[in-house]
Image (tube, helix red, strand yellow):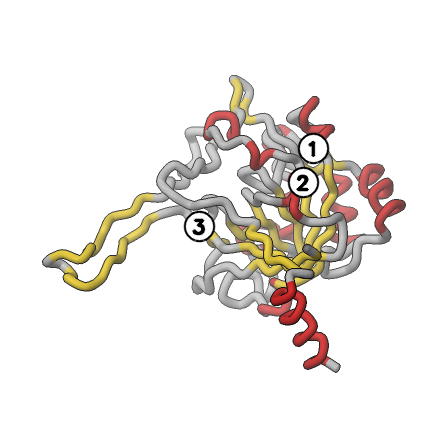
């Protein structure tokens, strides 16, 4: 039976009834990084330096040295990333069971709300509304918040910072609790630079999605794109971070298998 199911996936990809969707934004020196208040250590952007490029340092090969923070571009947040998850078992990139990195996707589309309010927060009532139309969010699912934010290709517009800090959508703390504990999702994914709303530093607790999700052993995916190519349900997401020893997260290539 298992072999038959896997062959059906292979055949679906071959026939074009299934498609592979890349949910990953390009990663380069221009990729924006999250900004923190000046009293905190900043995360560096990506820098690349050629080791050799078909030259005297390596006549037949090209490769680079790269330097970047773990949470740069489309990236994975492990539970150990946040203080609430620091003492959990299997909480780092190298110890998370790989089975947990694959799961069904539930995509909640709030693009219209965000277009009129960049500080939009997903609430439990909005989750209830989505479930009334599409069914209960399954345990072990990825909850992906489609906001249209990835269409902001200008770095300044993507960060959307003002005098009082950045403004971008995210999760009401009650929604994060509902998803982590009542629905038991494996994690959440967003199109914004981080999984908390831009103004989440002013919330109680500050950065509640990080606090709640990672405290419950859940994961985060940030800076996703192409969520408009996924249906509300019926796709599978594979989100595997680099196996960094003790890693709090890493850039990753997120892909989805979805109906064509």
C-alpha gap between disc 1 and disc 2: 6 Å
Discs 1, 2 touching: Cβ within 8 Å: yes
Side (left or right) of 50 relative to 98: left
Residue 244 location (% of width, % of height): 44, 62
Circle 1 Cα neighbour tier, 10 Å, few/some/many (<14 / 14–19 / ≥20): some
* Residue identified by numbered label 3: 70
Q: Secondary structure at mark 3?
A: loop
Q: Disc 2 or 3, which lies upstream in sequence? A: 3
User: Which label sits on residue 146?
Assistant: 2
- Rendered position, 244 above or below 165: below
Q: Secondary structure at mark 1?
A: helix
Q: Disc 1 or 3, which lies upstream in sequence? A: 3
Q: Secondary structure at mark 2?
A: strand
Residue 156 location (% of width, % of height): 47, 26
Side (left or right) of 168 relative to 116: left
* Residue identified by numbered label 1: 111
Q: Nearer the viewer, mark 1 or mark 3?
A: 1
Where's the C terminus, which quadrant?
bottom right
Q: Disc 1 or 2, which lies upstream in sequence? A: 1
**Residue in front for this viewpoint, 49 or 217:** 49
At x 46% / y 30%, what residue is drawn? 155
Where's the N terminus, which quadrant?
bottom right
At x 73% / y 35%, what residue is drawn? 110
């Amino acid at each position: 039976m298992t072999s038959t199911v896997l062959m059906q996936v292979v055949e679906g990809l071959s026939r074009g009834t299934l498609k592979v969707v890349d949910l990953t934004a390009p990663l380069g020196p221009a990729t924006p990084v999250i900004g923190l208040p000046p009293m905190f250590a900043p995360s560096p952007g990506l820098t690349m330096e050629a080791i050799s490029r078909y030259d005297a340092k390596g006549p037949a090969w090209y490769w680079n040295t790269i330097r970047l923070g773990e949470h740069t571009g489309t990236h994975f947040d492990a539970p150990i990333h946040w203080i609430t998850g620091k003492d959990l078992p299997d909480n780092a990139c190298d110890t998370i069971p790989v089975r947990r990195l694959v799961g069904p996707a539930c995509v909640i589309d709030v693009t219209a709300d965000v277009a009129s309010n960049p500080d939009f927060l997903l609430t439990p009532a909005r989750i209830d509304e989505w479930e009334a139309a599409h069914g209960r969010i399954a345990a072990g699912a990825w909850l992906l918040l489609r906001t249209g934010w990835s269409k902001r290709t200008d770095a300044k517009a993507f960060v959307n910072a003002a005098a009082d800090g950045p403004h971008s959508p995210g999760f009401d703390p009650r929604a994060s609790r509902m998803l982590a504990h009542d629905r038991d999702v494996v994690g959440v994914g967003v199109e914004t630079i981080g999984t908390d709303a831009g103004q989440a530093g002013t919330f109680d607790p500050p950065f509640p999605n990080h606090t709640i999700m990672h405290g419950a052993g859940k994961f985060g995916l940030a800076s996703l794109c192409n969520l408009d190519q996924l249906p509300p349900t019926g796709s599978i997401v594979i989100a595997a971070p680099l196996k960094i020893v003790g890693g709090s997260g890493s850039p990753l290539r997120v892909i989805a298998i979805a109906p064509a």
